[in-house]
Amino acid sequence: MGLLAGSLPDFPWDTLTPFAERARAYPGGIVDLSVGTPVDPTPELVGDALAAAADSPGYPTTHGTPALRQAVVDWFARRRGVRGLDPAAVLPTVGSKELVAFLPSLLGLGAGDVVLHPSAAYPTYDVGARLAGATPEPTDDPAARLAQGDDVRLVWLNSPGNPDGSVLGVDQLRAVVDAARTSARPVVVASDECYAELAWDEPWASAGVPSILDPRVTGGDLTGLLAVYSLSKQSNLAGYRSSFVAGDPALVARLLEVRKHAGMIVPGPVQAATTAALGDDEHVAAQRVVYGRRRRVLRAALEGAGYAVDRSHAGLYLWVRPESGAQDSWATVADLAGLGILVAPGAFYGDPEHVRVALTASDDKIAEAAARLSGA
């Protein structure tokens, strides 16, 4: 019924094709900064773990191996300040996008239910609500919206944010949790935290990006709360579809039961690789240095060429607009395509004036983009 209840938007990336063709025609070819897909090698220790588990004739467990779930628990305690998480409240997923797309359906949402998501947002939050037959609603103040009625059943938070790199502090997270818990109907608060290990500005670079599961946010009660995380960005595992959700044990048990029936299972070798990746912080720190270097080069070039970079406190993108004044995001895409640089319009994410510029290109490509911007 969900698909019949509302039509899906067109897949946005198809509309970039003419701009990509224009960028390819530039002398030296295209520098594609439109999609945040990692280009650096997968860590050797992860590949070794995958290979060691390659003889995998039996069905993997939907809940994930005990070693994987314990690795997630240990990672939350070590890296996110969340201690005492129940391993039973951890569930591996086939990438984070499928969970974002299907969480409203898995929770049984439908007509009359509202799903809140950030105003500038990854479009899959909207799509997931539509797939369930629920109503997506963008807002920059979910706590205030929750106080306006009892129709909200799911709140999506995204910190650090894609596309704009915004970060929610403990007080902001707690305000949403408190508002959800005073609602007349049960409200799930799900936080997409996939870029948490890639903070650039203070205080987040030193103190870390807080999780929705942080005890300063939850007061020690995880009821109604889910944190979603992916190793695609921090560990270059986008091709592995290595992700997980954790939080409220009762909610995770509900998700597990449905996923068992639906056969939504992370392959065994990928579970082993995920376990290895979560146990090693060195490769994450090394990758962060690489992205930090690319970010400095690209940001300086953009600002030197007359662009302003807003927010962008964390994550793998710069949120950019012309410094001289308001301009439609598609016009900025066209301007940069004229230099052979492809970026994503803010229109994809609900913002008509910014463009999203990814850091996920090789050092040589980032240097080439910077040179073209400097020449312009």
Image: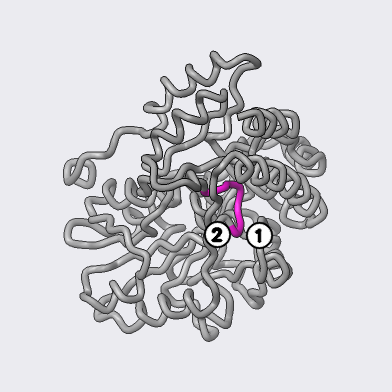
Residue 255: % across, % down: 43, 59
Give 202 or 325, whichever is nearer the viewer: 325
Q: Quadrant of the C terminus?
A: top right
Q: Residue at x 64, y 35 (%)?
A: 57
Please report the bounds of the magenta region as a residue range: 313-319
Question: Is 231 situated left or right of 5 in this image?
Answer: right
Q: Is residue 85 magenta?
A: no
Q: Residue 42 appears at what percent x and percent y?
A: 74, 38
Crowding at mark 2 (Cα within 10 Å: few <14, some 14-19, many 20+): many
Whether residue 92 is visible = yes
Whole-angstrom CA distance, mark 2 to mark 1, is 8 Å
Which residue is identified by label 2? 160
Q: Are marks 2 and 1 in contact (CB under 8 Å)?
A: yes
Instruction: Residue under label 1, please give it.
Output: 199
Q: Is residue 128 left or right of residue 57?
A: left
Residue 257 to residue 143: above or below:
above
Q: For this rendering, which residue is in front, 135 or 201?
A: 201
The amino acid type, in three-letter code, at marker 2 is: Pro
The relative height of residue 256 versus residue 145 in the rendered view (above or below) is above
